[in-house]
Image (tube, coloured by chain):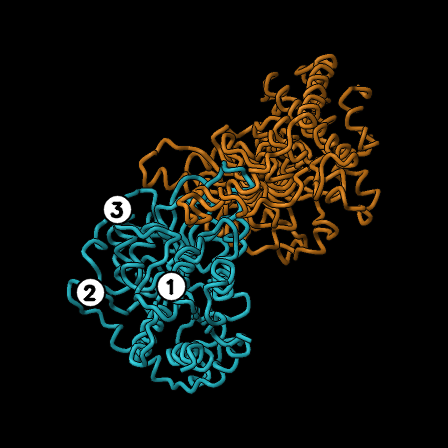
Amino acid sequence: MALRRLALSGAAALRTSQGHAAALGPQLLRTYASTQMTVRDALNSAMDEEMARDDSVFIMGEEVAEYQGAYKITRGLLQKYGPKRVKDTPITEAGFTGIGVGAAFAGLRPIVEFMTFNFSMQAIDQIVNSAAKHHYMSAGQVTCPVVFRGANGAAAGVAAQHSQCFAAWYASVPGLKVVAPYDAEDSRGLLKAAIRDPDPVVVLENEILYGESFPIDEAALDKDFTVPIGKAKVMRSGSDVTLVAFGKMVGYCLKAAELLEQEGVSAEVLNLRSLKPIDRDAIAASVRKTHRVVSVEEGWPQHGVGSEIMAIAIEECFDDLDAPPERVTGAEVPMPYAQNLEAAALPQVDHVVATVKRMMNK
Amino acid sequence: MASTAAAALAGRLAPPALSSRPAGAATAPLCPVGAARRAARRSTAGRVMAVATPPVKQAAAAKGGKAAAVTKEEAHAIYSDMVLGREFEEMCAQMYYRGKMFGFVHLYSGQEAVSTGVIKACLRKDDFICSTYRDHVHALSKGVSARKVMAELFGKKTGCCRGQGGSMHMFDREHGLLGGYAFIGEGIPVGLGAAFQIAYNQRVLGSEQDDRVSVNFFGDGTCNVGQFYESLNMATLYKLPCIFVVENNKWAIGMNHPRATAPSSVADNEPWIYKKGPAFGMPGVHVDGMDVLKVREVAMEAVARARRGEGPTLIECETYRFRGHSLADPDELRKKEEKDHYFARDPIPQFAKYMLSNGLATEEEIKELEKRVQEEVEDCVEFADQSPKPDMSQLLENVFADPKGFGIGPDGRYRYEQPGFTAGTAEVS
């Protein structure tokens, strides 16, 4: 039933391209007050601080050094730490990912940047078979404190091969931890935690969010600030419905919650932050409070992160539910290029609002 | 001589242990001996070239002088290591057929001169190696005890990975064994990553005296995989202390090497792998992989280069597996003539003969060395057989270095510790 609704909601979407244009436009400029920080600067400062803190941390990937990062996430690091710790690699994902994994086995803490996670498909054997499994296969003798990070999820106008979400793929693998930051605080805290973590961590960033600016607390600017992996964050408290999301969709849920408030619906927004381990307790606690749950993700519906959230809601709080849980996801198609089709293939704020209203019989 | 214990030993699986047929006729010399050697030495001074050691025709035994650079103790260690590799693998076959081990088991018999010549003869305990699914003997040569390896194969708690890795995934942190990799090519960049760590240690962390090396082993089939080329490129690009050892046993399961790999140049019309080295800025060396002293000589030079900080070397060892790809392989494609050709070059009796003719061992000493190995292998089987199965608690251990990887439950305890998380229903045998 939920699937059918999904398909309908995807097809019914009549968004225009202005959505993306608006998302990309002014946010690419970074001129903000001291209490504001872009996701780009948050990620950059997190790596900078961790490289300063620990000599065994280094970054490798395509264009990370002299080019200053394809998305400028590594800007300035080459100048500060030199070419031995900020390592440009050839365009050889399997090769350099494997080197990162081997270097981690041998005791270093590599940050492997994928220009985008689309290219991690070239290296997925080294991530799934080398990084994730060797601690287990070696009965704990080998540890792999590596970070795989880069842009994940839908970008704008780049079509099927460069615009997709791999959250569900990586989060299904035992031995990998997977985090997906939304704002500047998440980005700093999760990336720093990932670098310090003894296990391989996949950090799923979002290209569209890189230039977006968020308010950030003084505490989150501390060089030892970290966000615990495995804990979700309530971004907005509510009593009628729980909206669960990660990464960019958290922002959509917050917007949807504002719109819903005008209609008299109080929505709670849960930012998962970590997809593996996933914070079952936070999801369950929120659902027990609101009795309704909608998951929102950009990825495909079948076997997606939303499916896991539905399962958790049903397993943990079946008797608390006042309505069947629902998923809002990307349409089950390769990403189309044309702007109108692309918008129709992705969840929009309106979809979230419409889904909740239907669920509430409004 | 003809009835040495070594010949008898090898003869168990390779009937014509010492053939009178001139071996090596199939391989033509690629360049004159002296010139090749000189070229190889010169290459250490910055020149990159492909060299081939002379073909097998002149076995080390026949040459006397030069190769006798090995001491008596070294010779005995080399011989014992090769015999251990052979005896261990033959025992594995028996145990597999008796149902003591399971799954895929790939045996190394016939290739011992490579493992021994590179690992046992040239590497230190703190050097790294990365292996493949054919990894038992590499583990043994690196110093992992036969007991631990056999127990791992039996799926027992006392195995080098407590029974969690199995035949294709041998690890031993203490001995720098970074694993057996079941996917071809998977281990090459990982081994290179270990070399990267050594270089990082020298260049960033200030441990200039760190002269460890990392050695990758893989087969001819792997040389058609992308990671091989990606790694050759980056090894030279970053000048890493790494040695690539190709164990060219001619067959990638049922695919004969020339059927899978294109000629390395227009001129020679042969799929030489070592010639790919110079294309990536590193020396490429071809060596008779059935002659342990020749392998040792080439490996010593490559290891010395890497220790001196002069970068990687690609070594192609011409070798042969005396058995099928795995114990499940009916081995129907390889011709008897080809097998006989290589059986006649069995590295073990060949080296026994060399020791005898160079006064490095008497027949009695050889028998004694073999007896000790046989006892070791008997002992490891008994040990493995009597060892306990893994505890069921192991099922959920070591997925993450950090047990919080499974998340924390409502009672504040790690979720994996909670009853009902999943007890697992699989019988661990």
The answer to which of marks 2 and 1 sits earlier in the sequence is 2
Indicate the chain coloured orange by its letter.
B
- Are the residues under badges 3 and 1 in a single subunit? yes
Label 3: element kind: helix
Q: On what subunit does the disc labeled 3 rest?
A: A
> Do the CB atoms of the residues marked 3 and 1 lie less than 8 Å apart?
no
- Are the residues under badges 2 and 1 in a single subunit? yes
Looking at the rendered image, the disc whose residue lies closer to the viewer, 3 or 2, is 2
Q: Circle 2: is it few (<14), some (14-19), or many (20+) Cα within 10 Å?
A: some
The answer to which of marks 3 and 1 sits earlier in the sequence is 3
C-alpha distance separating marks 3 and 1? 43 Å
The answer to whether A270 is drawn above or below residue B164 in the figure is: below
Type of amino acid at the residue the image marks with label 3: Ala
Which residue is tagged 3? A52
Residue B348: image location, x then y, percent: 72, 27
Indicate the chain coloured cyan by its letter.
A
Furthest-left residue in view?
Answer: A33
> Do the CB atoms of the residues marked 3 and 2 lie less than 8 Å apart?
no
Looking at the rendered image, the disc whose residue lies closer to the viewer, 3 or 1, is 1
The answer to whether A154 is drawn above or below residue A66 in the figure is: below
Question: Count the marks: how many?
Answer: 3
Which residue is tagged 2? A36
Q: Circle 3: is it few (<14), some (14-19), or many (20+) Cα within 10 Å?
A: some
Quarter location, residue B316: top right
Checking the image for residue A289, the label placed there is 1
- Asked whether the viewer can see residue A62, the reply is no
C-alpha distance separating marks 3 and 2? 23 Å
Residue B387: image location, x then y, percent: 65, 27
